[in-house]
Amino acid sequence: MIFKNLSEKDIFLDVVTKGKHSALSKIAFNIAQRIEADDQAVLRGLWERESSGATGIGRGIAVPHSLLDSISKPVASFTRLAAPIDFGSADGDPVDLVFTLLWPRSAAAAFLPALAQLCRMLRAPRIREGLRLAQSSDEVITILDGDPRAIDWPVPERAAISVSLR
């Protein structure tokens, strides 16, 4: 799976954005820098796909993607946004976890199986929560590469339960 082989250079935590276009612009720039591509071409590919249908898949997750002629192998990145934004998800939840895929058009047949595998992985609440709580790229890599139980996460304040006996 492509997201099991991310490096620190593919992970961007707590990115500040003003909305979907701002997020996609920053993601396109970061990916283009890494693969030495034209960031405007990457953004154009992501935005064209987004314009044909929102890539928010629910539960605070979006998977913007594009098939490109200019790349020879798949490229992936993970971005956690500082504040959730509207990505047009069917469930209406704003997005804070963004998995971006650029796929060579010449290998398009392999794209949908990779996307389906990612979506299956993200069904696990523990993985989603772990990605939201990760303090570093290394923790993100550990979560995506293996068993999220290997990380000793602090209990988030929003998960605290108070009981009143009155």
Image (tube, grey):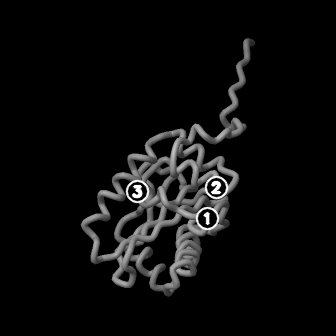
Q: Residue furthest left?
A: 109
Q: Residue furthest top?
A: 165
Q: Mark 2 or 3 closer to N-term? A: 3
**Residue at 70%, 31% in the rendered image:** 160
**Residue at 47%, 66% in the rendered image:** 76
**Residue type at tag 2:** Asp
| Residue topped by disc 1 | 8
Quadrant containing the C terminus in the rendered view = top right
Mark 3: secondary structure: loop
Asked if labels 1 and 2 touch by Cβ distance under 8 angstroms, the answer is: yes
Seen from the viewer's position, the closer of residues 157 and 51 is 157
Mark 1: secondary structure: helix
Q: Label 1: how many residues lie within 10 Å, few (<14), some (14-19) or many (20+)?
A: few
| Residue topped by disc 2 | 138
**Residue type at tag 3:** Met
Asked if labels 3 and 2 touch by Cβ distance under 8 angstroms, the answer is: no
Whole-percent x and y of residue 141? Answer: 57, 54
